[in-house]
Image (cartoon, rainbow, N blue to C red):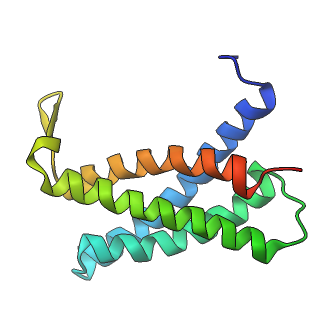
Amino acid sequence: MLGISRELFWRIVRFGVVGTSGFLVDFSITALLYELLGISIVIATGIGFCFGATSNYILNRRWTWRSTNPNIKGEYVKFLGVSLLGLGIHYIVLLGCMQLPWLVINLFGYEISNDWTSKLIATAVVMVWNFVVNNFYTFKTR
């Protein structure tokens, strides 16, 4: 299976499912704040992140990595640290896609330079970061 173990393959699949649910939580909160309440996309993204990251930790701990680490607080702090670094990466990509003209990409005739498309690109980049670092750091088994 693409040179990866069956266990790792299914962990990636579970991570994707959990990430999708966290993305929906994050995106829903962000949309509510941005579209309905008029809060800037940058601030709305930060608030949506907090809700999405917490739901992701709970589901990833229990289902993706099936962690039995008794130090839940320490594990949660690691997860949030990784997520906060991911948020920094998210903001860099988000703002880069929105502001830097050389990052404007033409895909199938659609110019990728608006707020929502920029958020989707940033989310994809951070998803890869989160899996790799959480797999080898946060939920690393001894």
- Give the number of marks: 0
> Where does the image place residue 117, in percent across and percent down from the top left?
26, 49
Q: Quadrant of the N terminus?
A: top right
- Whether residue 142 sits left or right of residue 62 in the image: it is right
Q: Position of residue 54 (x, y in %)?
A: 61, 71
Asked if residue 38 is positioned above or below residue 113 in the image, the reply reads: below
| Nearer to us in this view, 12 or 34 | 12
Which residue appears at 21% of the width and 80% of the height? 38
Residue at the spot 90% in from the left edge and 70% down from the top edge: 70
Rendering coords of residue 116 (x, y %): 26, 55
Q: Residue at x 14, y 57 (%)?
A: 99
Quadrant of the rendered structure where residue 68 is? Answer: bottom right
| Quadrant in which residue 111 is drawn | top left
> Depth check: 87 or 111 in front?
87
Residue 100 left/right relative to 132:
left
Asked if residue 140 is positioned above or below residue 82 in the image, the reply reads above
Residue at the image point whose x is 79% and y is 26% from the top: 6
**x, y percent for residue 62:** 80, 59
Residue at the left extreme, as displayed: 101
